[in-house]
Amino acid sequence: MKNTFSSLYLFMKGQRLLYTGAILAMGAATLFGLLTPLVIRYAIDTVIGGKEVAAPPLFAGILHLFTGLFGGALSLPEAGGLFILLSLGGGVFLYLKGRWAAMAAESMARGIRERLYDHIQRLPYAYHTRAETGDLVQRSTSDVETIRKFVASQFVEIGRALFMVGLTLSFMIQLHKGMTLYAMAVVPVIFLFSFVFFMKVKGAFKQSDEAEGRLSTTLQENLTGVRVVRAFGRQCYEEERFDFRNREYQSLTYRLIALLALYWGVSDFLCLLQIGFVLFMGGAVALQGGMTVGTLAVFVLYEGRLLWPVRQMGRILTDMGKTFVSVKRIMEILEEPAEEDHPEAGTPPIRGEIVFQGVSFSYDEGCEVLRDVSVRIPRGATVAVLGPTGCGKSTLVHLIAGLYPCETGEILIDGTPVKRIRRDWLRRHVGLVLQEPFLYSKSLRENIGIREESPRDEDVHAAARDAAIHEVIMEMEKGYETAVGERGVTLSGGQKQRVAMARTLMAPYPVLIFDDSLSAVDTETDAAIRKALAMRKEKATTIIISHRITTLAEAELILVMDKGRIVQAGTHADLLAAEGLYQRIAALQNDLAEELSLVMEGEDENGRSGHEYTS
Amino acid sequence: MSTPHKETTFSRQLDMALWKKLLDYVRPYKKECLLLALFMILCAGADALYPQFNRIVIDRFVEQGTFRGLGGVALAYAVVVSLQALAVWAFIRTAGRIEMGLSYDIRKKAFRRLQELSYDYYDTTPVGWIMARMTSDVTRLGEIISWGMVDVAWAVTIMAVMLVFMAVLNIKLTLLALCVVPLLGLISYYFQRRILKSYRDVRKTNSRITGAFNEGITGAKTTKTLVLEEKNLGEFRLLTGTMYRSSVRAAVVSSLFLPVVMTLGSIGTALALYYGGARVLEGALTYGTLFMFISYTVQFFDPVMALAGIFAEMQNAQAAAERVLGLIDTEPSLKDTPDVAAVYGDNFTPRKENWAPVRGAIEFRDVSFRYKEGEHVLQGFNLSVRAGESVALVGETGSGKSTIVNLACRFYEPTSGSVLIDGTDYRKRSLLWLHSHLGYVLQTPHLFSGTIADNIRYGRLDASDDEIRQAARLVNAHDFIMGFEKGYETQVGEGGGRLSTGQKQLVSFARAILADPAVFVLDEATSSVDTETEALIQKAITTVLKGRTSFIIAHRLSTIRNADRILVIRKGVITESGTHEELLLQKGYYYRLYTNQFMEEGEEALLD
C-alpha cells in the first residue's frame, strides 16, 4: 500500500501544485459554506432581534469589514447581499476545485496513458510474442480510468469530508460547546454504518457484475456462433440458456438493489435522527436561554450539510481498494524492462554483409533454438533458408534485425557486431517482413507509405506493383483510399502479406528478409514478386525463408536447418546431389509426375471420358 | 426491413408513438408503478415536513419559553422519520423491481427476435452493434423508466406540498422566495444537456484511445520491424491531447453547474431573508416561519434540478428506445409461411410429429441469387445431388461456392427459381425442419463456453454420456479429450479458446456426427494444423461423410479426392464437373489446382 501511494505520487509529478490548489479550493469552498448560515444567524439575532451575539472570529472579521463599508450595523437588504456574496465566493472556489482537480487528474491520466503506450512499444519482441492483448488493453484503459476517477473525485471527496468535519466541528465549538456534542452524537455511527455496510456488500456488487459478464458472454457467443445455432436448429435451446443468464442477472442485481434499499432506509433514518436530535435538544437549550434562535438555525443548517459527505465516505473508502489494485496492475507493465541499446552502440554504415560466428541462442534456460551457427552471407547475395517447423530459421533472421539479443557468439554486419549498432538504426537498414504482418487501421496508401512523412503516389504505386498488389487495389471501389482494419475491408491473408511486402519495398533497404512472408500467396504471384525484386536498382542482400522449391532453387545460397543447426548449405545443384531434406522436397515433383501419369495411363486403358457436365 | 443505419438515426423531437410503445412494456408492472407513486408521495411529503418542524420548535417552544408539548412533537418527528425510512426502503426496492423486470423483458423479447432474424441481417449488422443495443441501451431504458418515474413523482409531490405549506402562510413571501425557480429550471436544463453532450464526446474519444491501445499492442511486433515507435507515439499523443481537452471541457461545464445553481438559489434565500425579516420586524411573521421559508428556498433546488435532469436525459433515452425497439421490430427476411408454420410449428414450439422425413436429395432448379443491392452471384443455376452423394466445391474466393452451400442449407433463399429437397420445394417445409437435419462444420469452428461434453451434446440435446463418447471416438477425438485432466468435463473457455484449432475442429465433428444429419456441410479450413491432427481430421471427415448427402468447400487434396463428385465453380458457373481422375484429364483449372496443392501439401508435410 505504501508503494502504491508512492507510485501515485510519482504519477502526479508536475500536477502536484495544481492538485494542492484544488484541495485548498475545496477547503475554502467548505469554509464559505459554513459562513453563509452565520449570515442568517446574524440577520435573525442581530438585525431583527437586536441582540449582539458573539460570532466565530473569522465571521466577525468579515462582518466588521462589511459594517465598516456601510457605516454601522447592517440592514436586512445588506445582510441579504452579504449572503449572496458569500455564496458566490463559495461557488467560485467550488468551481476552481472542480476545474483544477480535473486538470490535474486529466494531465496525470494523459501522462500515464502516454507512458504506457510508449513503454509497451519499447518492450522486447519476446514480451510481445507471449503478451495477452486483451489484458494489456484492459490495464491501459480501465485501470487508468479507475486511477483517474480516484484522483479527480474520490480523493477530493475524502478531503471534502475531512474539511467538512474538521471545520464544522471548530465552528460549532465556537458557537456552543454543549450543542456540538449533540450535533456529533450519531455522526460516527452513520460513518461506521456506511463503511461496514459497503464492506459487507462488496460481494453483492461483484456478483452482479459477474452475472452481467456471463450474460453478455452468452449473448456474444450466440451472436458470433449464429451459424452453428441455426445449422443445428438450436434457437429454442439458446433461448433457454439466455433466459437463465438473463434471469440470474436480474435476480442478483435486484438483490443488490434490495440491499442498497436497506442501506438508504437505515442511513436516512440515522441522519434524520441526528438532525432531529439537534432540533429538539437545541430547542430545549434555546428555550432555556442557552443560545439564540439564530444559533439554533445555524446548527440545523450545518447538520444538513455535514451528513452527506460523511455517508459518502463509506462507499469511497471501500472503493479505494480498487484503485490500489489498478496502480499495481499498471506498475507491473511499467516495471517490465524495455529494450535497451548497448551504451557504446553506434550508427555505422550498413551495406549488407552478414556474418554469424558461433551463434547459439535460447529463449528459455536450457532449450537451445540455435546451436553454434556460423555462416557468411556476402553483400547483395540472395539466400534461402529451409527447415522443419521449430528448426530455428525464424530466430536466425530475427537476430539479424536485433529483435532478440545475441548473447553467445557474434553476428557481424559489415564487420560491426549487431549489439554495437543502435536498434533503430539497424532496423532502418534491415527490412524484415513477418509471416503474419500487421496492417494499421489507415488507408492502403497510408499503410504502404507508413514510414514516410508524405509519400509520393508514384512511389506507393511502384512498391505495390513490385509486390503484385497494385491491380488488386485498383479493382477496389476506393482504390488506395480503401480503409484497412476494423472499420475497413477484410483482406485475405495473401493480400495482407503483399501489402506488407509493398510497405517494406518503399525504402531502399540494404538487407531484406522475408520470414515466410509469402506463404499465403499463390505460387504464380510468388514468382512474379521475386522477378520484380530481382529487377530493382540496388540489389539488396536478401534472405528468404520458404518451403517452395521454386523459390529456393533461384537462391545463390541455400541453407537447410534442423534442430538449431545448419545441416546443409550450397546451391540448388549441390543440394540436389546430396541426400537430405532438400532432395526429398525436390523429389516431390517426381512423385507428382508419377501420379499424374498413372491417371493418364488409366485413361488410355479405359478410354473413359470425363465430360459429364451437370449444368 | 429496417437497416441498422436507419435504426441509428433518431429525431430530436419527442416521439409520442415510441413512448406509447414503451408503455406496453411497463403495463405488466402497473401494480408496482402505483405502489411506487404511493411511496414517493409519502417520501416527498415527509421531506417537505421537516422545515415545518423547525418552525414549530422555534415558534411554539423557543419563542414561548415552554417545554409543554415538546415531547409530543418530538414523538411526531420520530414517527415521520420512521415512516420516511420505510418509504425510502420500499421505493428503492419497488423501482429496482420495475427496472430489472423491464430490462429482463426487453432483453428476452429482443433475444427471441435475434434468433429469428436471417443471415442477411447478421451479414450487415456488426455483432458489437447488437451487443451495445442489448446491454447498455436496454440498461439505460430500464433505468430511465423506473428511476425517471421516481424522480418525477418525488419532484412533483415535494414541490406541490412545499408550495402549499408556503402559500398558506404568506403568498407574497412565497412568490418572492421562489421567483428564481423558473430561471433555475431553465439553467439546470441547459447545463445538464451540455454536460451530457460533453461526456458523450469524452466517451467517443475514449473509445478511440482504446482502439489505439489495441492497435499499438497487436501491432507492436510490426512496429518494431518498421521502427515506427516515434511516429505512433506522436499520433497517440494527439489523441490523448484531444482526450485531455474534451475531458477538461466536460469537467469545467459540470463544475460550473453547481456554483451557478447555488448562487441563483442564494438570491432566493436573500430575498426571503430581506422581505421575511422585515415582516418579522413588523410582527407579521414569526421567527419560525422565516426560518421555514429559508429552508424551503434551499430545498426547492433539488426537485427542480431533478426534473431538468430528466428532460435532458429524455433525448438520449429516446434514442436508446428507438434503437432497441427498432431491433425488436426488424422483420426476418426468411420466414415460414403461415400454412407451413401451422403444420410444422415454429422455432420455439416445433411439431415434429408432422415432419416429413429427409432423405437428402437436393436439386437446384434454375436458381438465381444476389445479395442485397449486389450483383447476381448465381444466374439460372442447375445442380442435382443424389441422396448420399458427396460433392466437393473448388474455386477461387468469391466464385460463389459459399452461396451455393448457403442456398442448399436455406440460410438464404433463391431470388428466383427453387431448391428442392427430396423433390419438394423447401419453402413448403419449415426452416427448422431442414436445419434440424443439417450437420455443419465451419472453417473456423465455433464452440460455446462450457465443457467438452456440453459442446458435443449441442448436436443432440438428449444424447447420453455414452453416445457422446461414442461420437468422439468415431472422429478420433476421444484420445485427446481423455488426455485432459478432467476429460469430457474440461472447460473449453470462451469461444473454445482453451483448445487448439485442430482440437476444436475434432470436437465440432463429434458434435455434427452426434446430430446424425441427412445433409452435411463442411467448410474446410485453409490453415493447416500439425500433420498428426490433420490425419485425425481427415479420418473424421471420411467417417462423417459416409452415407450422407454432403457439400464440401474443400481445400485439402485428400478431402477433394474422396468426394463422389468435384465441381469447379467460377463466377457462379460450374466450369468443370466429375471425379478426380476425370477432371485431371481435362487439364483445366482443377489440374492446375491439384499440381500446385500437391507440392504445397507435400512440402508442408516434409517440413512439419
Image: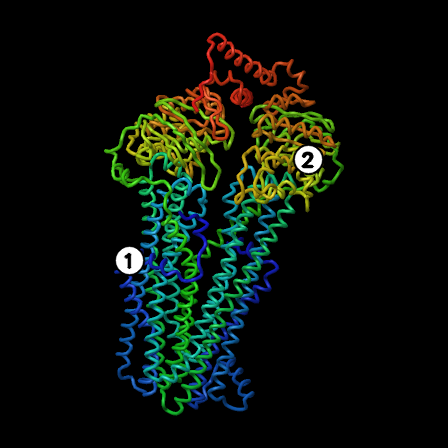
Q: Kindly identify which numbered label has been placed on residue B426.
A: none
Locate residue A593, reporting x and y percent.
Answer: 56, 14
- Eyeballing the image, is B384 above or below A309? above
- Residue A500 in view here: yes
Q: Mark 2 lies on which chain?
A: A
- Eyeballing the image, is B424 above or below A80? above
Residue that appears at 68% across and 46% down: A454
Locate residue B98, reporting x and y percent.
Answer: 31, 57
Locate residue B443, reporting x and y percent.
Answer: 45, 31
Q: Are marks 1 and 2 on the same chain?
A: no
- Eyeballing the image, is A32 above or below B325? below
Distance, label 1 to label 2, CA atoms, is 70 Å
Q: Report whether B102 appears left or right of A476.
A: left
* Near-viewer residue (A282 or B545): B545
Residue under label 1 = B27
* Secondary structure at numbered mark 1: helix
Q: Residues within 10 Å of mark 1 (few under 14, many from 20)?
A: few
Amino acid type at image mark 2: Val
Residue under label 2 = A430
- Eyeballing the image, is A262 above or below B389? below
Furthest-bottom residue in view?
Answer: B282
* Secondary structure at numbered mark 2: strand
